[in-house]
Image: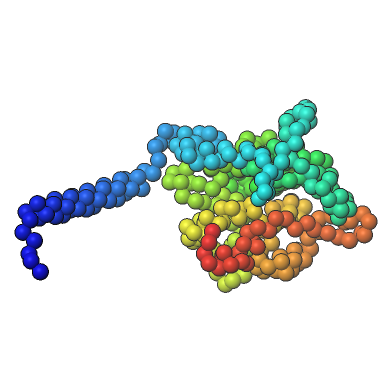
Amino acid sequence: MAKDSNPGTSRRWLVAVIALAAIAAFAVAALVVNIFERKQEARNPFYRVVELNDTIDDPAQWGRNFPMQYDLYLRTVDIQRTKYGGSEALPHSPTQADPRSAIARSKLEQDPRLKVMWAGYAFSKDYRERRGHAYMLDDQTFTERQQANPPGACLNCHASMVTVYNQLGSGDMFKGFQAVNHMKYPEARKYAKHPVACIDCHNPKDMQLRITRPAFIDGIRALKASRGIQNYDVNTMATRQEMRSYVCAQCHVTYYFRGAEKTLTFPWTKGLRVEDIMAAEDEDKVTEWQHPQSGAPLIKPRHPEFELWSLGVHARSGVA
């Protein structure tokens, strides 16, 4: 084959090679710059507008440093039923006793059998579809279940409690937790200002995930002990991936109120299976009410979402 002696073709090839080399050099430089920027962001991954600490429980203040996350938090006010679920808002005429302008649909009206099943228990008075986190405190404060005079420990999963526990415990969250357990709900409610918020799951110094609920700290320690791991400290021994689930498990679990002090307790001393939880509650002689028709002593299992997740394929696969 004859050799190509066209100088124009050679120049075009040379230009193409130079252009490709320039593009490659630019890409490498851009990658280096990007890596450097990410490293700088890792040192201080947000613009520090306010200095946060454990006395600031208002999520709006945290939102000044973390506007994107705060925007997502605010979206929990949405009330819209979709084909995937969601709660439908019903109009409500505000009163002095209940100032809400909207409420969720009643499950008791949807399934009247629940009134019979829970006869003699607070949930037979009022049980509604769940709304977003933004409503968790108001919906608990103004539910008709308040007629049953619930314990202050109910606030554990409906209010931002870090500052409350620290205030009532003089800086000791466990003492503050016990103080709230000993109160009735109306008394404890005076200390709570916000629904569960940023401070409840994040360390204000470095934003790392943390556990702030003594009931979970005790519960997970008992669970680990049942598996042969003694003196488990969740905030120092859990992995980051575990913490991504544990922060949710501070509330999305089943529980009961132990003894006359109404201490919030997670029944995990024997494990997380329903048989284990029933055995633990039987051992502790837990009875929440006596059914007025059957006379049977009863307890109410509560949203065991962490327990069910823990026993499923996602937990086994390491998915938070």
Q: Quadrant of the C terminus?
A: bottom right
Residue shown at 66%/50% (left/top)?
A: 84
Residue shown at 59%/53% (left/top)?
A: 248
| Left or right: 116 as drawn, with respect to 279 | right
Residue shown at 29%/50% (left/top)?
A: 35
Task: Name the image quarter holding residue 224.
Answer: bottom right
Q: Nearer the viewer, residue 85 or 42?
A: 85
**55 above or below 11?**
above
In this rendering, the count of numbered labels is 0
Q: Nearer the viewer, residue 82 or 218?
A: 82
- Name the colour scheme: rainbow
Residue situated furthest bottom in the rendering: 228
Q: Nearer the viewer, residue 175 or 289?
A: 289
Q: Quadrant of the N terminus?
A: bottom left
Residue shown at 61%/41% (left/top)?
A: 76
Q: Nearer the viewer, residue 199 or 283?
A: 199
| Left or right: 135 as drawn, with respect to 233 | right
Tell me residue 152's x, y (percent): 71, 44
Residue situated furthest front in the rendering: 2
**214 above or below 164?**
below
Tell me residue 271's x, y (percent): 65, 68
**75 above or below 36?**
above
Task: Name the image quarter holding residue 139.
Answer: top right
Tell me residue 191's x, y (percent): 65, 36
Tell me residue 221's x, y (percent): 59, 62
